[in-house]
Amino acid sequence: MKPKNEAKNYITPEGYDRLAAEWDFLRHKKRPAVVSALADAAAEGDRSENAEYIYRKKQLREIDRRLQFLSGRLDIAEVVNPKDQPQRDRVFFGAEVTVTTEEEDEVTYRIIGEDEIDGKRRWVSWKSPIGKALLGKKLDDTVIAEWHAGQRELTIVAIRYDWEGSGVMPEFI
């Protein structure tokens, strides 16, 4: 159950599946392998100067910390399927938005959850300055978005909700 003061954690089905797959991989594959290696290192004797033992303990702590983080994010996740968006003439969560910049360059952003952002692909959070500027807008609207180097004017030239998942396997597998 979500705490009442917890912020919304909107996420696409693909994003949720990636987080769940990472949790499953860490919990059922990576952690048992590290525990086994830790037991082997512990069996070698003096643990105070055993580099392998110290390394495996650190690795186990990092895995447990990541599992706890992922569990928390999955617990509060609200899965929103962009394909179910009834109002497709406006920018909402899950939209793929093509804009023209002041320099007439065309750039496409995907408005997604915080756990899915990817700067190289221009997947931005709905809470980001670009996401906030675009949310609720429609085709041909011009917005001013906060940028790391000031402000930029963006004009919306296309809005799509029928994009498919990335098809990219998570890095941890």
Image: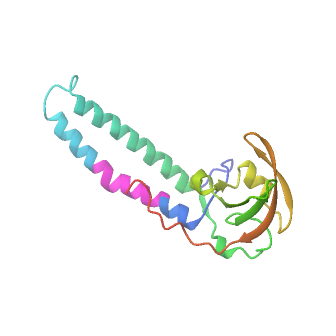
Residue range in magenta is 19-32
Does residue 21 appear to the left or right of 59 in the view shown? right
* Residue 83 is at least partly visible in this image: yes
Residue 144 image offset from top left, x and y in percent: 84, 51
Which quarter of the figure has residue 66?
top left
Task: Assign the N terminus to one quadrant of the image.
Answer: bottom right
Which quarter of the figure has residue 76?
bottom right
* Residue 27 belongs to magenta span: yes
At x 71%, y 49%, the residue is 128
Task: Assign the C terminus to one quadrant of the image.
Answer: bottom left
At x 70%, y 55%, the residue is 126
Residue 140 image offset from top left, x and y in percent: 85, 67
At x 53%, y 62%, the residue is 16
* Residue 110 belongs to magenta span: no
Residue with the most extreme left position: 44
Does residue 92 appear to the left or right of 50 in the view shown? right
Which quarter of the figure has residue 11?
bottom right
109 is higher (above) or lower (below) than 37: below
Query: Closer to the camera, 8 or 133?
Result: 133
Does residue 143 appear to the left or right of 49 in the view shown? right
Predominant secondary structure, magenta span: helix
136 is higher (above) or lower (below) than 61: below
